[in-house]
Amino acid sequence: MIVCETPRLRLRHLAPTDAAFILELLNEPDFIRNIGDREVRTLRDAQHYINTGPIASYGRHGFGLYLVETREDAASIGMCGLLKRDYLEDVDVGFALRQAFCNHGYAFEAACAVMRYGLEVLGLGRIVAITAPDNHASIKLLRRLGLEFERSIRVPDVARDTSLFTPPQRHAACCEASSPPHEEQGDEETAAGGSEHAEAGRSDR
């Protein structure tokens, strides 16, 4: 199921058939360093991750992490979506890209589209984000999305502090004043919640 599209990207529901891509993404060094080791080592593990994470979230909350693919050739490049975590009052945006597709403005383009979808289609009043304090690429991107550092929080099972970014007020149309995503590059990371690449990861973390 396609959730939203941008000039260059398509975001759709993840399916068990995406297991090979998820296995690669979750084992990239940047993902493990910035987001965490999800202990996904086999295709079966990846299918379990998809079924118990994104797919379960679609049913429980009506949203979750989505597969990001290029419109030109349907190449899978990452994940981006909305997560409802037990330890956060608000829904947060998370994103994670394969390293080969970073520094092309894709993370900003996908995150902006997802936030618009959450605010305008799902009717969410506020969307926040979390990331590691030293994840400077993610922090730069979150600021471009209109979010500002609010405070440090402690996340279950994470030894270090996590930075919480929130909108200065209720969101208007996300990214309205921002330049087209392809005009600014070099500001993405593997973002993910829970995905610290702005944290994309399990919805229960």
Image: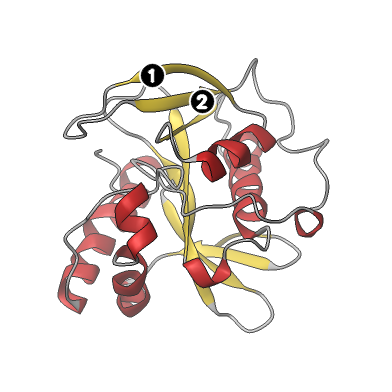
Apparent side of residue 105 relative to residue 200 in the rendered image (left or right): right
Instruction: Name the mark nearer the viewer: 2 or 1.
Output: 1
Q: Where is 93 relative to 64, above or below?
A: above
Find residue 78 and report its horizontal and vertical position in percent. 48, 64
Cβ atoms under marks 2 and 1 closer than 8 Å: no
Residue drawn at point x = 59 percent, y = 54 percent? 107
Residue drawn at point x = 31 percent, y = 26 percent? 161
Question: Label 1: which residue?
Answer: 152
> In terms of image quadrants, where is residue 118?
top right
Graded by Cα atoms within 10 Å as few (under 14), some (14 to 19) or many (20 or more), the crowding at tag 1 reads: some
Q: Where is 72 relative to 3, above or below?
A: below
Apparent side of residue 163 relative to residue 27 in the rendered image (left or right): right
Residue drawn at point x = 17 percent, y = 71 percent? 41
- Secondary element type, mark 2: strand
Q: List the single residue furthest toward the bottom.
A: 73
Apparent side of residue 162 relative to residue 46 in the rendered image (left or right): right
Query: Depth check: 56 or 202 in front?
Result: 202
Mark drawn on residue 165: 2
Mark drawn on residue 118: none
Query: Depth check: 189 or 172 in front?
Result: 189
Apparent side of residue 182 relative to residue 126 in the rendered image (left or right): right
Find residue 156 and report its horizontal and vertical position in percent. 19, 30
Find residue 155 and report its horizontal and vertical position in percent. 26, 28
**Amino acid bearing label 1:** Ser
Quarter of the image that includes the C terminus: top left
**C-alpha gap between disc 2 and disc 1:** 9 Å
**Amino acid bearing label 2:** Phe
